[in-house]
Image (cartoon, rainbow, N blue to C red):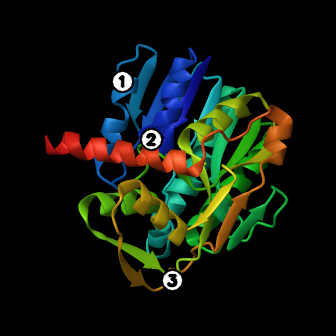
Amino acid sequence: MKCLVTGVAGFIGSHLCERLLADGCEVVGVDAFIPYYPREIKEANLTNARLHSDFAFHEIDVRRDRLDSLVEGVDVIFHLAAMAGLPKSWTQFDLYESCNVTATQRLLDVACRAGIQRLVYASTSSVYGRFANGDETLPTRPISPYGVTKLAAEQLCRAYAEEIGLPLTVLRYFSVYGPRQRPDMGYHKFIQAMLTGGGIAVFGDGQQVRGNTYIFDCIEATVMSMNTLPGETYNIGGGETASVWDIIHKLEMLTRRKATITREPARPGDQRSTCADTAKLTRHLGWKAKVGLDEGLAMQLEWQAQTAMRQAA
């Protein structure tokens, strides 16, 4: 099987690429290295994949470059490329619109012409809005420009699926964490602060609750989603919730250090509570999360500590 992975140099994309290669797939990887965070981090994410003879990488911007040759012979497209993170979406909307909506439309267009077997679109719990607690029937009411663009891309995918016959699966990820997590994400920042003695910024009252998904569980669900009936939408979540204060306390226990806390105003568009009901995915594919939050945080902590040691050497 030949797969195309967009956003392949990112946190989730690089893990997905390695899993597909391990499963015997041929993988075409695409990334534009948009400088949301340092390029060298993304390059490091691709280290293992670049050693594999069945991996081909193309530095291409899906928003503007020609795409037809990329999809030749491709069976499945995993569309993970996006501009992530909600804070900057308030001030850089054009960037989010182009990366999340325009790029998706251009990829959908060539995918339909190529007659692919499946397009898996990676969406987010942010499409649900302030409270994302429940199953896939929850109303979609995003409260950030980021969430709006991801929902718009979902709707584009639906249009191509229903009117042109694109075989589609939509996945809504809930707070994915683990090794290679982006440096702008909360748990990465918290761990980095605990390792270096820096301060942890807590926005608002710190009672925001997240349903957490370890990266390996996320990848397992993503790969399995190729085998669902077309047209389905699935929540992908680990099922274990924790507030900001809960996470900080767990990291204090793991590091045996006291966190230095700074308080900041609440951020506009920040979700208050998320917890994925994944019963549909379990019912359809038998998927269940396997990695608990304590175990997953310990593995991310170890990875970040080892990465820091290599960089210092």
* Residue that carries the numbered disc 3 in the rendered image: 204
- In percent of width and height, residue 280 lies at 84, 45
The answer to whether one can see residue 191 in this image is yes
Q: Secondary structure at mark 1?
A: helix
Q: Earlier in the sequence, mark 3 or mark 2?
A: 2
Q: Nearer the viewer, mark 2 or mark 1?
A: 1
Q: Are marks 1 and 3 in contact (CB under 8 Å)?
A: no
- In percent of width and height, residue 129 lies at 69, 70
Q: Quadrant of residue 260?
A: bottom left
Is 98 situated left or right of 141 in this image?
left
Is 142 situated left or right of 51 in this image?
right
Is 294 situated left or right of 234 in this image?
left
Q: Are marks 2 and 1 in contact (CB under 8 Å)?
A: no
* Residue that carries the numbered disc 2 in the rendered image: 65
Q: Earlier in the sequence, mark 1 or mark 3?
A: 1
Q: Nearer the viewer, mark 1 or mark 3?
A: 3
Quadrant of the frame with the C terminus: top left
Question: Label 2: few (<14), some or many (≥20) within 10 Å?
Answer: few
Q: CA distance from mark 3 to mark 2?
A: 41 Å
What residue occupies the far bottom of the structure in this picture?
265
Q: Earlier in the sequence, mark 2 or mark 1?
A: 1
Quadrant of the frame with the N terminus: top right
* Residue that carries the numbered disc 1 in the rendered image: 50
- Kindly identify the amino acid type of the residue bearing the numbered disc 1: Arg
Q: Taking 241 as reference, is 144 above or below it?
A: below
- Kindly identify the amino acid type of the residue bearing the numbered disc 2: Asp
